[in-house]
Image (cartoon, grey):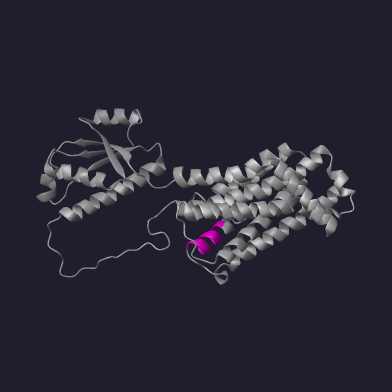
Amino acid sequence: MKPFLAFVKKEIYHILRDRRTLLILFGMPIIQVLIFGYAVTNEFRGASIAVLDQAQDELSTDLQRHLVASGHFAIIEQVDNVSDIESAFQKGKIKMAVVIPPDFSQDFYHRKKAVVQVLSDGSDPNTASTLLNYVTNMVNQFQVRKSQAPPLPLQINIESRLVYNPELKSVYMFVPGVTALILMLVSAMMTALTLAKEKELGTMELLLVSPLHPFLIIVGKVTPYVFLALINAIFILALGVFVFGVPIKGSLLLLLGLCLLFILTALALGILISTKTDTQQAAMLTSLMMLMMPTMLLSGFIFPVESMPRLLQWISTIIPAKYFIILLKDVMLKGSGIELILWEVMVLGIMTLFFLVVSLKNFKIRLA
């Protein structure tokens, strides 16, 4: 063990002397957490809208106040005709327009039915559908508040409550996703680049003729990244808790254990990539194509897997980050114990063993 520990110590010193590596290891996580936490959100506040109020009465004015009071909308323009609305859309000044008809009050109070037209910019379907849902809910609330109909003798009232994320904060979803993305990139990509660099420079052969067994050489090369990735995981979770208020309802020790398991999975995947590439450039491109895009798009990080086509749902079952994100959400938000997450833990464990076995097999073939 003494030569092995000396080899690991040498690798740690080598990493600490490389400023670019340190920037990737510790700078990238900070930037990504802050960007996803503050800039990337599913919530809309102060969306710019225009209003064409053809009624110009007390009820239409009250409706406008009701829309603005939610904080989701900001009326930036009162237009006089439909052509002004189209011009505002073309200039990108507004996301939505509300048209109130001339007989709005009369239709509402006397005919018991009024129509409000809502125009939304469909060039961004996600934003358009979200804003339409907002305005629909707010108009329904306004209608109930203004309605003078007597209450029914028999009623069924619905009392709803959101569990685990009552305020629907998008950061609750992004922190587990960013943690998975960063750990995957730091562990797998840096491992693949480190081993590819040794082969590219021709120093891998020198290491293989050293007294250490080739398996110990590989383990020694990736061991520092285990500790560095675990430090990253702790740092990301701390940012989520203390900066964005994401709770950790489950066991902190269990959470760190799951992070360590995923780090080992990512390291094993990085070793596998390194056995298939001979240059750092090839290792970088392979890592980005195999790790970054699938982790972001097919893991449930940004888009729900259940809404994807069946083929993509099947492909997502081989994405390690999918199971890690589920584990993080269950432990952090739901407070689940190990007995409730055994399936996901077992899948990650099997993936880790599979990647290691295939990597060692390819490594021996290359030696031969």
Q: Position of 128 compared to 238: left or right?
A: left
Task: Relative to 51, say whether 330 is above or below.
Answer: below
Residue 259 drawn above or below residue 57: below
Observer-nearest of 143 and 216: 216
Can residue 165 be seen here? The reply is: yes
**Residue 114 magenta:** no
User: Where's residue 243, x and y in %?
Assistant: 47, 51
Which quarter of the picture shows residue 120?
top left
> Number of labelled discs?
0
Q: Where is residue 246 in the image (x, y as percent from the top left)?
A: 46, 56
330 lies left or right of 87: right
**In percent of the image, x 35 and y 37: which residue is there?**
121
Instruction: Please provide percent x and percent y for residue 214.
Output: 84, 53
Residue at the far bottom: name it.
339
Specify whether 88 is left or right of 367.
left
Residue 277 in view of the camera: no
Q: In which quarter of the image is the N terminus?
A: bottom right
250 or 8, which lies in front? 8
Image point (87%, 44%), residue name: 205
Between 133 and 341, the residue placed more toward the observer is 341
Give the magenta range. 325-333
Q: Where is residue 223 in the image (x, y as percent from the top left)?
A: 73, 54
* Residue occupying the point 27% across, 41% down: 118
Query: What main secondary structure does the magenta stretch of the protein show?
Result: helix
